[in-house]
Image (tube, rainbow, N blue to C red):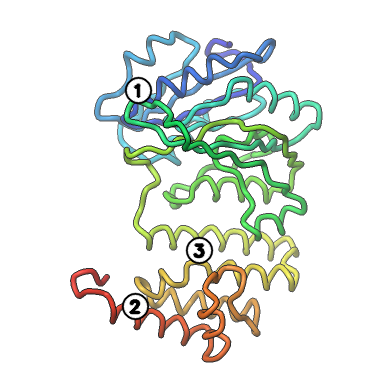
Amino acid sequence: MTLPGDYCDISVIIPTYNRDILLKQALDSVLRQKSLDGIRLQVIVVDDCSTEPPRELLAGYGPVVEAVFLPEKVGQNPARNVGISRARGTYLKFLDSDDILVDGALAVEFAEAEEEQADMVLSGWGTVSMDHWGNHIAGTERTFPAPDMNPIPDALLRGRAVPVAAALYRRSYLGDLVWDPQVPKLTDWDWFCQAALRGGKIVSIEGAAYWWRQHSGDRETRRPRLSTAHNFYRILGKIETHLRAAGELSEPRARRLAQYYYKELRTLCLFDRPMFHEILDKIHALDPRFSPRDEEHQSFMRLLARVIGTRNALLLHTALKMALKPEGKRP
């Protein structure tokens, strides 16, 4: 472990808001890494103006945990950016305050990054439900392997990514990249895509790096459906802009991107009709012969779109859905 001011190998950044019990478990999972021999670690906790800031809890860890208490609530992404500004590690690891690292995960990722001279090391991860006290509920565990990201543009257009703590990032590779404060939902996906699109060396390894813990408490990223859709299209727009600028938006990729743009159209049709038409126009510009396929899982909608067109199919589907919905439950 390192003290403030020292150079270190890995900076672990943990934003938090009103999560004393879970924050302690997250911190303990970092500090008890069993295979950290010789690895210098910096731990940064950024409290996003909790109603009862965890000063006593963090003080109990002494100087091995650097605590930052923000004077006003800014949101999870700006809080992470504060952590980045204070990081001194060769590598960065982000961890949410309600999740926990798997023992030894940092050592495995660090060794792989050094051996392969990788800019991003991807691990698997697990999901598990927990009770109010942070105890895992038996039988709810699921694990997921790290994806193959080669070639990077095609992998991203297929939706391949890892959640926030399933990656280790070389800090020099990230450069001036920051978490987008305008993307309060789908934040992990946005960050991962922007980091991957920088074109560095990405390697995937076996084994889970952390447990993404599901619970009834409010997660910082919980938002209504329309907000999720807006964030989704903001992120896809970034990907499209990058691929165009880099000359990497080939015809096959444009067709796949058009399919990806279709994904949240039903939500837009219900709640944001102007943007619905705007995205449909973009889809047909990318693929003039577009017909929903990859992101439309209902066969009757795929058939209906071929018969009367995608726009008319979605408008008809929405009208029927609204007609069958009770008056009080309409948007």
Indicate the amino acid at tag 2: Lys
Q: Residue at label 3?
A: 233
Q: Residues within 10 Å of mark 1 (few under 14, many from 20)?
A: some
Do tag 3 and tag 1 residues touch (Cβ < 8 Å)? Answer: no
Asked if residue 202 lies left or right of residue 274, the reply is right
SS assignment at label 3:
helix
Residue drawn at the location 63% of the way across and 16% of the way down: 7
The N terminus - image quarter = top right
Numbered disc total: 3
In the depicted view, which residue is nearer to us: 151 or 183? 151
Q: Residues within 10 Å of mark 2 (few under 14, many from 20)?
A: few
Indicate the amino acid at tag 1: Ile
311 vs 17: above or below: below
Circle 1 or circle 2, nearest the eye: 2
Q: Residue 321 — which label?
A: 2
Q: Residue at label 1?
A: 21
Asked if residue 132 lies left or right of residue 314, the reply is left
Q: Position of residue 191 (x, y in %)?
A: 56, 46
Q: Residue 29 — which label?
A: none
